[in-house]
Amino acid sequence: MNFVYILYSKLLDKFYVGEASNLEERIEQHNYGFYNNAFTNRFQIGCYIIISNVNLGFKPEK
């Protein structure tokens, strides 16, 4: 099972769309600086969609 998710930053007034197979782990990576200087560590999850096929996840992400 895969997820397409949308993060939102009030501070930046911006959205970020991503795809992940483990949503909880991926959100933790965003929130706890897994990627140094990532601007998404200031985002909150807005919504997510469960998808059955990873190839379908890349369409909304783009």
Image (cartoon, rainbow, N blue to C red):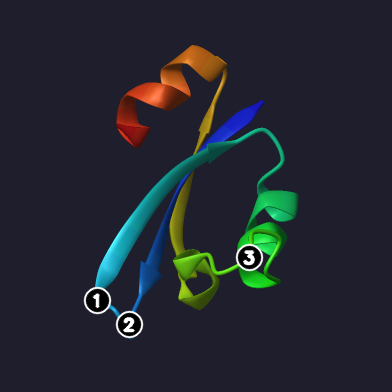
Vertically, is 25 above or below 46? above
In this rendering, the label closer to the viewer, 3 or 2: 3
Vertically, is 9 above or below 3? below
Q: Quadrant of the C terminus?
A: top left
Residue 21 position within the rendered picture, expressed as x and y whole percent measured from the top left: 67, 33
Judged from this view, the residue extending furthest toward the bottom is: 11
Secondary structure beneath dot 2 equals: loop
Asked if residue 2 lies left or right of residue 61, the reply is: right
Q: Report, in whole angstroms, how far the alpha carbon at label 2 lies from the one at label 1.
A: 5 Å
Q: Quadrant of residue 29?
A: bottom right
Secondary structure beneath dot 1 equals: loop
In this rendering, the label closer to the viewer, 3 or 1: 3
Q: Residue at x 67, y 51 (%)?
A: 26
Q: Residue at x 32, y 31 (%)?
A: 60
Vertically, is 21 above or below 40? above
Amino acid type, mark 2? Lys
**Is disc 3 in contact with disc 1, using a CB cutoff of under 8 Å?**
no
Amino acid type, mark 3? Asn
Q: Report, in whole angstroms, how far the alpha carbon at label 3 lies from the one at label 2.
A: 20 Å
Residue 24 position within the rendered picture, expressed as x and y whole percent measured from the top left: 72, 54
Pointer 3 local density, CA inside 10 Å: few below 14, some 14–19, many at least 20 = few
Vertically, is 53 above or below 29? above
**Is disc 2 in contact with disc 1, using a CB cutoff of under 8 Å?**
yes
Residue linked to disc 1? 13
Residue linked to disc 3? 36
Residue linked to disc 2? 10
Q: Quadrant of residue 33?
A: bottom right
Amino acid type, mark 1? Asp
Q: Nearer the viewer, residue 55 or 32?
A: 32
Pointer 1 local density, CA inside 10 Å: few below 14, some 14–19, many at least 20 = few
